[in-house]
Amino acid sequence: RGDYGLAIRAMAEVSRVCGATGFMVWCQAVCGLYMQASGNPALAGDALLAHAAGDRLGGTALSNPMKALAGIEPLLLHARRVAGGYVVSGALPWVSNLGPDHQFGAVAQVDGEPGHEIMFLVRCDAPGVTLRECPSFAGMEGTGTYALRLQDHLVAEQRLIADPLRPYVQRIRSAFILLQMGMGIGVTQGLGAGS
């Protein structure tokens, strides 16, 4: 099991020097949380150990889903059932800590099944995944932030984090929020050190 105190202290130390890098550390930690809490054996074991060691980097595409679950905006990714999993299409404007060989957690609405969403792990180099650099004026340079499109991307059962989504979100919500403390603590300490 993860050590949240250690994760927060490490993130705070990084954020004290660079808030953007601390944000990327948070993305990595949260992606690991998704994998660890999934209960999917294919996302645990060697896959999780490689992620925790930094051999594979990861991001989190939950900005849109968190707003969607709060009724602020619709889900931007849509899934349809196929044998052995789902096929997902749609686009997200901002996902951070990405690169050609990275991975990220994402959420899609299952078409024709109101209230049924799935969460899954996507490899950026998988078929049907396209990354596009964000405009340079966006202030996100150095954070690996991309716009991404999924076009008929196959999500096999081995890549599912949660199906259905909502009970899973209730389980991880506290950890998801708690881990953000490291960024705030570190940035605040860094500002104090510079004054």
Image (cartoon, rainbow, N blue to C red):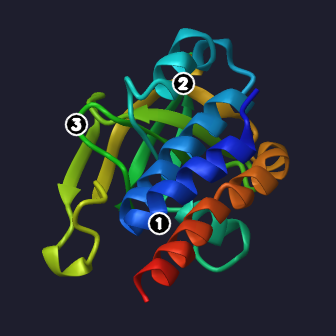
Is residue 6 in view?
Answer: yes
**Amino acid marked by disc 2:** Arg
Q: Say which residue label 1 marks.
A: 16
Return the residue nearer the eye: 21 or 68: 21
Q: Is residue 111 above or below residue 49?
A: below
10 Å crowding of disc 2: few (<14), some (14-19), many (20+): many
The residues bearing labels 1 and 2 have C-alpha atoms spaced at a distance of 35 Å
Q: Is residue 8 above or below residue 65?
A: above
Q: Secondary structure at mark 3?
A: loop
Q: Say which residue label 2 marks.
A: 159
Q: Say which residue label 3 marks.
A: 100
Q: Secondary structure at mark 2?
A: helix
**Amino acid marked by disc 1:** Arg
10 Å crowding of disc 1: few (<14), some (14-19), many (20+): many
Total number of numbered labels?
3
Q: Marks 3 and 2: CB-CB under 8 Å?
A: no
**Label 1 vs label 2, nearer the camera:** 1
The quadrant of the rendering that contains the C terminus is bottom left
The residues bearing labels 1 and 3 have C-alpha atoms spaced at a distance of 28 Å
Q: Marks 1 and 2: CB-CB under 8 Å?
A: no
